[in-house]
Image (cartoon, rainbow, N blue to C red):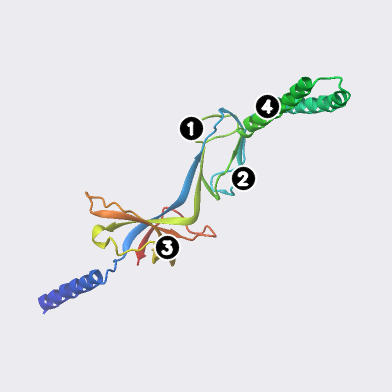
């Protein structure tokens, strides 16, 4: 009796799998939640950290200041360039009256105008150099790593890492037999592992068009909305189409 029931169970499982494949369906697939984007912040201008305004775990907004480098020299250069622009403008106003009275030549007037333009360009350059001493977030996200502290020297090596977790990426590896069964823009149900649990709807955004010959699989990415940031990246899940 036991043998007959075992055989029937095997046949039933085979028929279910065959029917699923025939309909173009995809069985549940294990997946992983990953950050939508990860940015590692370094400094384009090497220098000494004066202030780091965030800690690991902090939520940050795009444009928020993350850190500042010591910038006394750069500020002085900006002030000097601004003073030169103001002086050139006052000088031009004084000489405008002289030009009207034909006491200076057109050539002299042109030199004064060129001097103002050069001073303005030097001010812009100085201000841009000063901006390099301020590190701002380029995304909304969460600080996942902080390696720098005031007084540390920073340069090309990253000292802050920010991850965007809304939306989350759901990465899955699908057997090549199901290529074509998943459609870009389609939806799937994502069931999260414990301790979070729960089911959520995600949208297919990327389907790899190259199948890995060694494993006979291809990658698929779904996006899972996470507006409150309550779902953590790094969690395993099960995806059902």
Q: Is residue 153 above or below residue 187?
A: above
Residue 49, position as x, y percentages in the image: 60, 31
**CB atoms at circles 4 and 2 under 8 Å apart?**
no
Mark 4 or 1: the one toward you: 4
The residue tagged 1 is 157
Residue for badge 3? 203
User: How far apart are the two marked residues, 2 and 3, measured between alpha carbons?
Assistant: 30 Å
The part of the image, by quadrant, that contains residue 175 is bottom left
Q: Secondary structure at mark 1?
A: loop
Dot 1 or dot 2: first in sequence order is 2
At x 20% / y 71%, what residue is drawn?
Answer: 18
User: In this picture, is 158 found above or below 195?
Assistant: above
Q: Nearer the viewer, mark 2 or mark 3?
A: 3
N-terminal of the pair, mark 2 or mark 3, is: 2
Q: Residues within 10 Å of mark 3 (few under 14, many from 20)?
A: many
Q: Nearer the viewer, residue 164 or 56?
A: 164
Label 4: which residue? 122
Determine crowd level at label 2: few under 14, some 14-19, many 20+ residues with C-alpha closer than 10 A.
some
- For residue 26, side relative to residue 198 (left or right): left
Above or below: residue 22 compared with residue 228: below
Q: CA distance from mark 4 to mark 1?
A: 30 Å
């Amino acid at each position: 009796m036991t043998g007959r029931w075992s055989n029937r169970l095997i046949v039933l499982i085979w028929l279910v799998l065959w029917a699923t494949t025939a309909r173009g369906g995809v069985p549940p697939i294990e997946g992983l939640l990953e950050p939508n984007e990860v940015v590692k912040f370094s400094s384009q201008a090497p220098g000494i950290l004066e202030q780091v305004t965030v800690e690991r775990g902090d939520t940050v907004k795009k444009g928020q200041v993350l850190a500042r480098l010591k910038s006394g020299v750069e500020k002085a250069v900006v002030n000097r360039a601004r003073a030169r622009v103001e002086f050139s403008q006052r000088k031009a106003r004084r000489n405008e009256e002289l030009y009207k009275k034909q006491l200076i030549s057109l050539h002299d007037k042109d030199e004064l105008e060129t001097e103002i333009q050069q001073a303005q360009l030097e001010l812009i350059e100085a201000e841009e150099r000063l901006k390099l001493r301020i590190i701002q977030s380029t995304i909304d996200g969460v600080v996942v790593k902080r390696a720098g502290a005031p007084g540390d020297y920073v340069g090309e090596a990253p000292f802050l890492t920010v991850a965007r977790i809304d939306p989350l990426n759901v990465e899955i590896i699908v057997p090549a037999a199901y290529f074509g069964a998943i459609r870009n823009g389609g939806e799937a149900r994502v069931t999260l592992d414990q301790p979070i649990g729960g089911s959520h709807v995600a949208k297919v955004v990327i389907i790899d068009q190259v199948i890995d010959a060694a494993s006979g699989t291809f990658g698929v990415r779904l996006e899972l909305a996470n507006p409150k940031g309550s779902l953590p990246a790094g969690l395993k899940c099960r995806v059902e189409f």
